[in-house]
């Protein structure tokens, strides 16, 4: 094999030449000046020389190839570094440290969060934000992947532990976000204004307590969205609600084993063969309930906010995708993610496209849940920055494209949604085969067309039929 050694006349390149010389590979040396003493010495040793300069615009691809240094096996790197003296090794260490610090300061533009991944990537990312709150100033694209614990022990992510300094910073952040109208506190988070909504269906739960416990990294998402003020794209993926995801619904020996791994040792042992005693089961269930908001919800959902009090990371959002993993639909009571959380998303100030998967009202209580929340949001007064109340209210959504995949809603839900839109150019509805059929599709088409003058029939699709095929009639007033 022919091997080209870049920077062969320098310390590291020269070390590699010494390490590889006499081996099975045919070596070539890249140098800017073949007439230099170091280059002449290589030539004397029988190493063919090639002239090249990384600063030459015609050879930019060469500098990109240097990034592959990180892919070299550790044993080869050790073979190279052993030829450096102590002074050179010290310089290498300082350079690596400086490069690491510089890389941490480079603003991100796109990032993927891996919820509950065994590598603790979300916890580490949030820790970086606590230390450097401006790191996400240029972040415009945020994607979510779900790596919840399963029956496989390899997925049992350990609890995250905070340092004393990090707990202090969490307290600063907590005080900065506790009251939207309060005077900002001193510290690096003093510019934050929005408050967190910690009320859920199962009572009031404190999101910072869940974050401090280090178990459910999804609880970090609302906090991360405090720092991503220029976010334009948010893809939530197919969300998983539970701490441990199993293939079936109900009590699970494997599921309790996964939860037990997060408990103190004395709470793990109360088990006989493949059956846990009742008091242990109760302990596991209370533990899980303490770390999820309840009501088949995400911490993101219960903290979205509303017009005048949205999470900062949602204020400039243009494109949103929100789904739900189909593994949770294993009970007649679990039909999708609550459409009530779609209501505030429709009124985000700059939203253009919303793509939902398994959004539902069926099986979630009352069938008119979406209408109730739409009315509530439209009647919320919007507060100005000086604390005054504006007369303007969120009456219409700016959304231009709506896509409902595998939806679990009824006709009136779509008609109510149509009433709060006015800029739509595309609507796609794909109703779940397991849910009720849409009995009045022409009224849905009519409602969307009535409220959106730029929406043509051929840009409406319901269950793979175009608006022209479905036809349209004027929907009767759903309030009537």
Image (cartoon, helix red, strand yellow):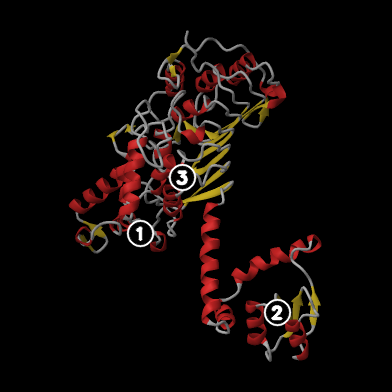
Q: Is residue 1 something that shows in the picture? A: no
Residue at 67% in and 18% down: 471
369 up-or-down from 403: above or below: above
| Residue 158 tag number | 1
Q: Are marks 2 and 1 in contact (CB under 8 Å)?
A: no
Judging depth in this view, the residue of 167 and 366 nearest the camera is 167
Q: Earlier in the sequence, mark 3 or mark 1?
A: 3
Residue at 45% in and 35% down: 337
Helix, strand or loop at label 1? It is loop
User: Mark 3 or mark 1: which is in front?
Assistant: 3
Residue 381's quadrant in the figure? top left
Judging depth in this view, the residue of 437 and 391 nearest the camera is 391
Q: CA distance from mark 2 to mark 1?
A: 47 Å
Residue 9's quadrant in the figure? bottom right
Residue that mark 3 sits on: 133
Residue that mark 2 sits on: 9
Judging depth in this view, the residue of 278 and 394 nearest the camera is 394
Task: Judge from the rendering whether residue 332 lies leftward or rightward of residue 17; answer left or right.
Answer: left
Q: Position of residue 388 (x, y in %)?
A: 41, 16
Q: Is residue 219 something that shows in the picture? A: yes
Q: CA distance from mark 3 to mark 2?
A: 42 Å
Q: CA distance from mark 3 to mark 1?
A: 26 Å
Q: Position of residue 352 (x, y in %)?
A: 61, 29
Task: Judge from the rendering whether residue 308 lies leftward or rightward of residue 473; answer left or right.
Answer: left
User: Mark 2 or mark 1: which is in front?
Assistant: 2
Picture quarter with the N terminus = bottom right
Judging depth in this view, the residue of 23 and 34 nearest the camera is 34
Q: Earlier in the sequence, mark 2 or mark 1?
A: 2
């Amino acid at each position: 094999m022919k091997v080209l050694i870049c920077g062969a006349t320098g310390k590291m390149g020269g070390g590699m030449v010494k390490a590889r010389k006499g081996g099975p590979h045919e070596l070539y040396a890249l140098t800017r000046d073949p007439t230099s003493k170091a280059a002449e010495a290589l030539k004397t040793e029988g190493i063919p020389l090639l002239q090249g300069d990384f600063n030459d615009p015609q050879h930019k691809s060469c500098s990109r190839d240097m990034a592959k240094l990180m892919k070299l096996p550790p044993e080869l790197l050790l073979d190279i570094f052993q030829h450096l003296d102590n002074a050179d090794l010290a310089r290498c260490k300082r350079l690596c440290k400086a490069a690491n610090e510089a890389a941490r300061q480079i603003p991100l533009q796109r990032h993927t969060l891996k919820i509950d991944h065994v590598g603790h990537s979300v916890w580490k990312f949030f820790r970086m934000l606590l230390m450097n709150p401006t790191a996400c100033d240029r972040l415009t694209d945020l994607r979510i992947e779900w790596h919840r614990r399963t029956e496989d022990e390899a997925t049992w992510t350990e609890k995250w532990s905070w340092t004393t300094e990090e707990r202090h910073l969490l307290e600063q952040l907590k005080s900065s976000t506790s009251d939207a109208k309060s005077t900002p506190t001193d510290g690096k988070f003093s510019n934050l204004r929005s408050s967190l909504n910690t009320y859920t269906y199962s009572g009031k739960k404190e999101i910072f307590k869940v974050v401090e416990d280090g178990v459910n990294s999804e609880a970090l998402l609302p906090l991360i969205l405090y720092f991503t003020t220029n976010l334009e794209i948010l893809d939530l993926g197919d969300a998983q609600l539970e701490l441990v995801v199993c293939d079936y619904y109900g009590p699970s020996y494997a599921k309790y084993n996964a939860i037990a791994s997060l408990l103190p040792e004395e709470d793990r042992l109360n088990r006989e063969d493949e059956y846990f005693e009742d008091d242990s089961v109760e302990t596991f269930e209370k533990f899980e309930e303490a770390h999820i908001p309840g009501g088949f919800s995400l911490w993101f959902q219960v903290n979205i906010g509303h017009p005048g009090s949205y999470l900062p990371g949602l204020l400039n959002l243009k494109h949103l995708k929100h789904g739900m993993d189909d593994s949770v639909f294993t009970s007649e009571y679990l039909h999708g993610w609550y459409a009530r959380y779609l209501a505030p998303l429709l009124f985000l100030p700059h939203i253009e496209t919303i793509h939902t998967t398994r959004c539902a009202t069926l099986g979630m209580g009352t069938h008119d849940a979406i209408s109730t929340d739409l009315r509530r949001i439209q009647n919320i007064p919007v507060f100005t920055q000086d604390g005054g109340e504006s007369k303007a209210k969120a009456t219409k959504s700016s959304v231009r494209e709506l896509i409902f995949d595998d939806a679990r809603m009824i006709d009136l839900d779509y008609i109510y949604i149509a009433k709060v839109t006015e800029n739509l150019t595309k609507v796609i509805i794909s109703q779940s085969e397991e849910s009720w059929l849409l009995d009045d599709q022409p009224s849905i088409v009519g409602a969307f067309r009535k409220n959106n003058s730029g929406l043509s029939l051929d840009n409406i699709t319901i269950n793979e039929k175009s608006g022209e095929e479905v036809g349209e009639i004027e929907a009767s007033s759903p309030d009537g």
